[in-house]
Image (cartoon, rainbow, N blue to C red):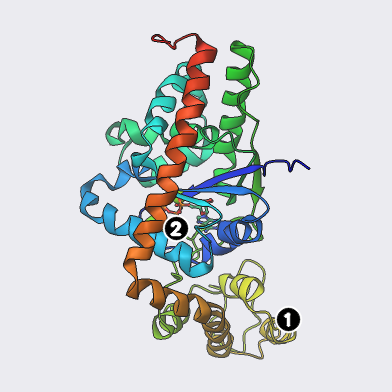
Amino acid sequence: MTTEPRKRILTGVRPTGSLHLGHYVGALENWIRLQREYECFFLIADYQVSDHADDISQVKGNVLEVATDWLSVGLDPEGSHFQIESLVPQHAELTTWLSWWVPMGMLQRNPTLKAEMGNLADGESVPVAFFNYPMMQAANILMPRAHLVPVGEDQLPHIELTREIARRFNRIFNVDLFPEPEALIGRVPRLVGIDGNAKMSKSLGNTINLKDDAATVTSKVRSMYTDPTRLRATDPGHVEGNPVFMYHDAFNPDVDEVNDLKERYVLGKVGDVEVKTKLAAALNTFLDPIREKRAYYEAHPREVIDALAAGTEHTRTVAAETMRQVRDAMGLNYLS
Ligand code: ATP
Ligand code: MG
């Protein structure tokens, strides 16, 4: 009996800091759920942090930090491949080839790229590498010929770009090399930040991190943006669009408690302090097992490095095969 090879997932994170609650509900939860069903390539995209060029000294620590977070939430490096992007140089090679078929305008119109560039300095000083990062992400996804990309909603334009590039390459060279990858969006497509900003994001500094200790979580929750129209606990409040209730919905499994808080909030019968105290408790219960696993990996850093080394090495062999096929398709295998 032959067994079908598992379909592949490629997804990843930029090494710009610790992972946070947004990552969990937007992406990680799906990675954990699907890691046995699919062959997973989990990428740490260290080529894609040119907006952090001023603190390049942080990148190495951040790479290890991300891998430690992954292990702490239960990603299993035995059945999947953790990889460091710049140690698989074929990513740069494929980006260069594929960029032949991507017009500038296609990147200029990309709404996520536009918004992120808006957060940086004036357009003139945005590094070329930053402008180009969605291209490189396309190369990351196409490298293992992935079928599925579980990500947060902000990544949708990049997956669309990747699908377009896959179609173009296959059509131009009359091959069936790249599957058109599907996006899979998480339970919460875009978790708001604790400051009320539309997206919790490492670079915006509005996160609750998976590694935050209980006291830090409690103090961050206390500082959270709630309903700006509500001045006193007796004022009727708004639940809709209120980050504190969005987090309750996402992380508090006690639905009765959440519904009771919501009912009292709109009637002006509960203060922010109680709502926030209950949220902090729910978050800390959710984070406790992750913290426990993290303590283990912090005490065994070699296991983190071994996971990265093994996955990266395997990915290089997969990448070499893809590049052989890419060059074959283009008729550029000069020496064979
Ligand atoms: P940075 O600000 O440095 O870009 P980030 O917080 O946006 O960091 P990324 O490494 O860019 O994190 O994103 C990794 C994955 O997590 C992506 O799939 C992204 O869509 C998802 N993600 C990040 N933030 C959120 C969020 N707030 N809600 C849902 N998904 C998110
Ligand atoms: Mg990001």
- Residue at position x 66%, y 48% from top? 184
131 sits left or right of 57 in the view? right
Q: Position of residue 11 (x, y in %)?
A: 53, 47
- Residue at position x 58%, y 37% from top? 159
Between 267 and 263, the one lying in front of the other is: 263
The circle on residue 255 is 1
Q: Are marks 2 and 1 in contact (CB under 8 Å)?
A: no
| Mark 2 Cβ and ligand 1 under 8 Å apart | yes
Q: Residue under label 2, please give it.
A: 201
Q: Is residue 40 visible?
A: yes
The circle on residue 38 is none
Question: What amino acid is at disc 1?
Answer: Val
| Tag 1 secondary structure | helix
Q: Vertically, is 29 above or below 300?
A: above
Q: Please tell me how crowded label 1 is: few (under 14), some (14-19), or many (20+) other residues with Cα within 10 Å.
A: few
Between 40 and 244, the one lying in front of the other is: 40
- Residue at position x 43%, y 10% from top? 336
| Tag 2 secondary structure | loop
Question: What amino acid is at disc 2?
Answer: Ser
Q: Vertically, is 259 above or below 229?
A: below
Q: Vertically, is 99 above or below 295?
A: above
Q: Earlier in the sequence, mark 2 or mark 1?
A: 2
Q: Position of residue 234 (x, y in %)?
A: 62, 89
